[in-house]
Structure formats: C-alpha cells, structure tokens
C-alpha cells in the first residue's frame, strides 16, 4: 500500500502523513459513538468504567467536569466496547499500512481516543510511546487518526522529526514520569512539526518519535483523535501493557509466532504505575481529585 518514497520518508523523519485515508461515513460512526459516551459521562463526577483488564478507569474526566459541561478527555480502548472501532483498527487499510513499515506479521496492542474539547486545558507533555510498553524489539507503530481538522489553534499534536533515532529518559528521581525531562520541552518545541491536517487524515508514527501538544484554546473547535498502537508479532512485552485491551496481541496482519526477536542494547523498564490516567501520570489532575493532591 505504501510506496518506497513514503517508506523512506517515514524512516527519515519518524512519521508519515496519509491524507484522506478514512472516509467521512466511518468517521461519522466513530464520532456518534463518542458522543454517546460524552452523554453518559454527564452522570459521573470522577473517572469511571473499571471493567478493564487491569481494573483502571476506561473514562477519564478533566477537572471541572459537570453534568452541564461534560469534560470527557479520554476513552481507553474504545475497541473493547465498540464494534465500529474494532472494524476500523483490525481490518483494512490501517493494519496494511502498518505492516508495510514493520513487516508482514503485526498485532494490535491497545488504543485510546483523546478528546480535546474546546477550552480543554489538558496538554500532552513530550514523550515517546515505547518507554510505556517496552518490548523485546522496537518494531512498532502508533497510528494517529484525525477525527477533526487540526492545527495549533485547537491543540494539534507536535512531533519532533528525527527523534526516533534519539533516546531520552522518562524517569525522574528513579520514578517513571510518563514524559521526558521538562527542562527539555522548550528545545523540543523549537524542533517540532505541528501536525496540521484534515479530518480523515492518518499519521503513522514510530514508537520512539517524541510527541506532545498544547491545550485546545479554541472556543468552538473539537480536537478528537484516535490513537492505536501496533507491534511486530515477534515483539514480546517485558512488562504488562500499560493500557491493556481485551484484544491485546490480536493478530491483524500475517501470522502469530512464539519466537521473540531481541534487539541489542539497553532499555528502561518500569513497574506498572498506579495512575489510571495518562494525564494524571504526567501531573494533570482528573475530575474529583483535590487541588494540591498528588495523583498516585
Ligand atoms: O492527543 C494527542 O495529541 C497525543 C496524545 C498522546 O500522545 C497520548 O495520549 O499518548
């Protein structure tokens, strides 16, 4: 599906844009499902939905969430509760494009839906994805599907080209903090590309590429993005998945294997962290958490 030129571009910059990959009809179905979850969230006042494989909350609410002003900022593994998401992520163009980059045998690792609603204060601090889920090798892709038009005004992601060839610790004082050292954020901002695009576009990102992004400062523009993590079938986790899906290790291209491929070198490993929220781990409180309280 991908040309040699596209594959070279991916290898050079650590990401590749595929414009207009997902149709308006499919996007409409994904968004209607999200809207149902937003409506349901009106009845909640703290993170909820603990029917997940590790008992952490599926639905993450930003501080300030109320019934009148719902602030559902993230849904972990929408695939686990919606067939629309399964169909898109397990069949067709997305697994095919991923296998063009990391080889014929690919498994689905997990996914999440990030909802930066207008006025959302939530940011994403610079991090790579592999340190959250280290495996025996690094052949993995994160797919970013734009569900809305995105630019800096509504908090598009920022990707640091070339950073997939660099390594930065995600630990501070011996603790996994879910981001690189905050002292480096300005430097990364100076190097980053703003991931500007239209609804339906897809970005394929190397799991070592540093990425982050600011809040949605617009008054009326949603910024909803589906994020899915895929790995080569011969990559085996060296710790349990951070956001486990009930479809974890489902083969979406090629064949399964029981033979792990190892890469040389070193890698940071982490204990499963207690936060149920990615944003909590990065130091941003969820609804129901008191001011000044440290997320555990
Ligand atoms: O929503 C975004 O802009 C990126 C989020 C991200 O990197 C994540 O949730 O892991």
Image: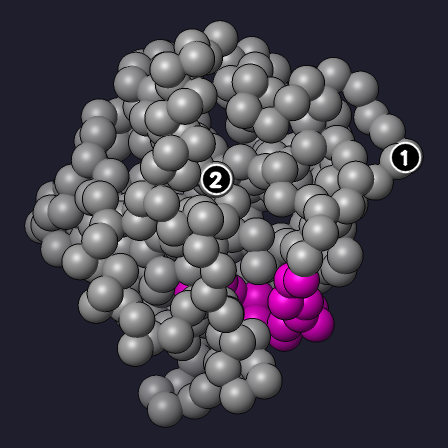
- Residue toward you, 140 or 164: 164
The residue wearing badge 2 is: 206
Kindly report the secondary structure that dominates the magenta region of the rendered protein: loop
Left or right: where does residue 171 sit relative to residue 234? left
Residue 23 badge:
none
Give the class, few, some or many, for how many residues have Cα within 10 Å of label 2's Cα (few <14, many ≥20).
many
Residue 258 badge:
1
The earlier-in-sequence mark between 2 and 1 is 2
Q: Can residue 283 be seen in this view?
A: yes
- Magenta highlight range: 266-279
- Residue toward you, 198 or 25: 198
Left or right: where does residue 72 sit relative to residue 156? right
Q: Which residue is drawn at 42% across and 59% down?
A: 127
Expressed as whole percent of the image width and height from the top left, the position of residue 84 reads: 54, 23
- The verdict on residue 277 being magenta is yes
Expressed as whole percent of the image width and height from the top left, the position of residue 258 reads: 90, 34
Left or right: where does residue 195 sit relative to residue 51? left
Display colour scheme: one colour
The Cα atoms of the two marked residues, 2 and 1, are separated by 24 Å
Q: On screen, 150 above or below 121? A: above
């Amino acid at each position: 599906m991908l040309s040699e030129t596209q594959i070279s571009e991916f290898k050079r910059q650590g990401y590749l844009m595929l414009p207009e990959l997902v149709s308006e009809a499919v996007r409409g179905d994904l968004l209607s499902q999200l809207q149902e979850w937003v409506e349901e969230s009106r009845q909640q006042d703290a993170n909820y939905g603990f029917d997940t494989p590790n008992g952490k909350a599926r639905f993450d609410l930003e501080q300030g969430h109320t019934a009148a002003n719902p602030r559902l900022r993230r849904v972990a593994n929408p695939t686990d509760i919606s067939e629309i998401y399964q169909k898109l992520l397990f069949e067709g163009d997305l697994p095919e494009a991923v296998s063009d980059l990391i080889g014929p045998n690919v498994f689905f690792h997990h996914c999440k839906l990030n909802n930066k609603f207008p006025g959302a204060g939530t940011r994403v601090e610079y991090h790579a994805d592999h340190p959250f889920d280290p495996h025996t090798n690094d052949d993995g892709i994160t797919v970013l599907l734009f569900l809305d038009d995105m630019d800096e005004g509504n908090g598009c992601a920022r990707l640091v080209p070339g950073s997939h060839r660099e390594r930065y610790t995600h630990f501070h004082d011996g603790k996994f903090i879910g981001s690189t050292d905050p002292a480096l954020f300005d430097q990364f901002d100076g190097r980053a590309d703003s991931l500007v695009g239209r609804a339906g576009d897809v970005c394929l990102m190397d799991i070592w590429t540093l990425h982050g992004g600011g809040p949605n400062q617009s008054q009326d523009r949603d910024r909803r993005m589906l994020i899915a993590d895929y790995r080569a079938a011969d990559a085996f986790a060296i710790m349990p998945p951070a956001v486990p899906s009930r479809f974890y290790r489902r083969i979406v291209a090629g064949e399964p294997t029981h033979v792990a491929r190892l890469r040389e070198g070193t890698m940071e490993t982490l204990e499963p962290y207690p936060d149920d929220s990615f944003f909590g781990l990065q130091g941003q409180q969820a609804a129901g958490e008191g001011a000044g309280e440290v997320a555990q």
